[in-house]
């Protein structure tokens, strides 16, 4: 059998994953055989995980962050909802989120037996009145998305945090994708901007770590302690993570990527990606397409369904929103010359 090779990123415009930073790749390989789930045995990677959380705290405006490196944004969101449920005093917990919240919240709700109430958005952003209307005394968390998966828009996080305080619920921010772009914008999205309790930010997306490396952060250690389970036969006495054995490669590569790129490298990445997104938006608008955004480096436009199918045949990987628009995610591997040949292919049809 021929040796399998991973796909190249040359024509990938649909993914929220990207080429890992060279240092992240090299570090991931060295730490493949380590397990941060057993910190008493794998002390070096356990230390690295504390470093990773410190880094993520710096990026999200939190001086003494509690948290850990998850398998991804899905686990981070599940854990945040679990914290909110465990902490609250109700038999019928519910979570209120905007309709564009990532589908991982549906998984969280099903697993945790929490009702998920979703409010319609206005102009692709969470609508406060709609969310307030759905919240009641059994609401354990309000969710805001800082960089939506489909359109890359940012919800009004400070207002959502205020509403959470009013109803006695936690405020969770999902910045799984946007978290490494947002520090270079004027958006108010993190612990330093609002009374956010928990936050998801994924090094394995824009952070350029190797997969798997997600992140969940909590404002205080007692929130994370809501997840603690006794672990009789490990050297550590309790565990807050969802999975047991975990990827030391993900953890170590997250530190390597953030060491290499925070802060100037990520800033350059953001500026290049945003410039590319704006360029693409202009090109599509000039061809008569209706363009949504870009608010962050993600462009959606009303290209017809057959057109995206033709593009796929030419090797382009583009995806569609639930509303049927074509969606191009300007990840760090997406260059201007890639987008130029993409637009040239569009003109061909
Ligand atoms: C990608 C994404 C997730 C899920 O993260 P995974 O790492 O794929 O589990 C959650 N929320 C948002 C906003 C995302 O973009």
Image: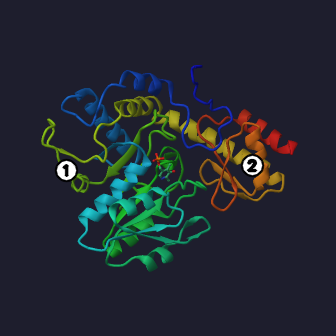
Residue 308 vs 251, above or below: the answer is below
> Secondary structure under badge 1?
strand
- Kindly indicate the quadrant of the structure image that contains residue 254: top left
* x then y, percent, for residue 214: 41, 43
Q: Find out if the beta carbon at label 2 lies less than 8 Å from the nearest ligand 1 atom.
A: no
Q: Report if the CB atoms under discs 2 and 1 are less than 8 Å apart.
A: no
Q: Is residue 12 visible?
A: yes
Considering only order in the chain, which callout, 1 or 2, is on the residue closer to the N terminus?
A: 1
Q: Is residue 232 left or right of residue 318?
A: left
- Kindly indicate the quadrant of the structure image that contains residue 32: top left
- Kindly indicate the quadrant of the structure image that contains residue 171: bottom left
Q: Residue at x 42, y 54 (%)?
A: 190
Residue 32 vs 328, above or below: the answer is above
* x then y, percent, for residue 175: 46, 52
| Location of mark 2 (residue) | 308
Q: Is residue 293 left or right of residue 220?
A: right
Q: Is residue 191 visible?
A: no
Q: Residue at x 30, y 46 (%)?
A: 67
Q: Is residue 89 left or right of residue 6?
A: left
Q: Residue at x 47, y 39 (%)?
A: 204
| Location of mark 1 (residue) | 229
Q: CA distance from mark 2 to mark 1?
A: 47 Å
Q: How is the image coloured?
A: rainbow
Question: Badge 1 local density, few (<14 within 10 Å), some, or many (20+)?
Answer: few
* x then y, percent, for residue 106: 45, 61
Q: Decide which of 148, 56 is in the foreground and name it.
A: 148
Residue 148 vs 280, above or below: the answer is below
């Amino acid at each position: 059998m021929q040796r399998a090779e991973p796909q190249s990123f040359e024509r990938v415009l649909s993914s929220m994953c990207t080429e890992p930073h060279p240092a992240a790749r090299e570090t991931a390989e060295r730490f493949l055989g380590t397990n941060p789930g057993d910190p008493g045995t794998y002390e070096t990677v356990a230390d690295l995980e504390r470093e990773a959380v410190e880094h993520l705290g710096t990026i999200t405006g939190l001086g003494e962050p509690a948290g850990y490196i998850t398998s991804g944004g899905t686990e981070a969101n599940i854990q945040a909802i679990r914290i909110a449920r465990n902490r609250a005093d109700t038999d019928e917990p519910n979570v209120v989120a905007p309709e564009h919240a990532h589908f991982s919240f549906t998984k969280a709700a099903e697993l945790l037996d929490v009702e998920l109430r979703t409010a319609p958005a206005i102009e692709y952003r969470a609508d406060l009145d709609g969310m307030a209307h759905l919240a009641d005394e059994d609401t354990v968390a309000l969710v805001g998305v800082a960089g939506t998966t489909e359109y890359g828009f940012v919800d009004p996080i400070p207002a959502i945090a205020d509403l959470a305080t009013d109803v006695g619920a936690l405020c969770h921010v999902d910045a799984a994708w946007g978290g490494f772009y947002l520090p270079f914008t004027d958006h108010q999205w993190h612990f330093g901007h609002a009374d956010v309790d928990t936050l998801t930010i994924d090094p394995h997306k824009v952070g350029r770590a190797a997969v798997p490396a997600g992140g969940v952060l909590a404002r205080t250690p007692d929130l994370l302690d809501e997840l603690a389970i006794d672990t009789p036969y490990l050297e550590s006495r309790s565990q807050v993570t969802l999975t047991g054995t975990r990827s030391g490669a993900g953890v170590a590569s997250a530190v390597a990527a953030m060491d290499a790129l925070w802060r100037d490298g990520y800033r350059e990445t953001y500026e290049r990606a945003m410039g590319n997104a704006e360029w693409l938006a202009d090109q599509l608008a000039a061809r008569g397409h209706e363009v949504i955004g870009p608010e962050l480096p993600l462009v959606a436009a009303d290209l017809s369904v057959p057109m995206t199918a033709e593009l796929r045949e030419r090797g382009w990987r583009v995806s569609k929103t639930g509303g049927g628009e074509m969606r191009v995610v300007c990840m760090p591997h997406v260059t201007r010359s890639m987008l130029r040949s993409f637009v040239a292919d569009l003109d061909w049809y």
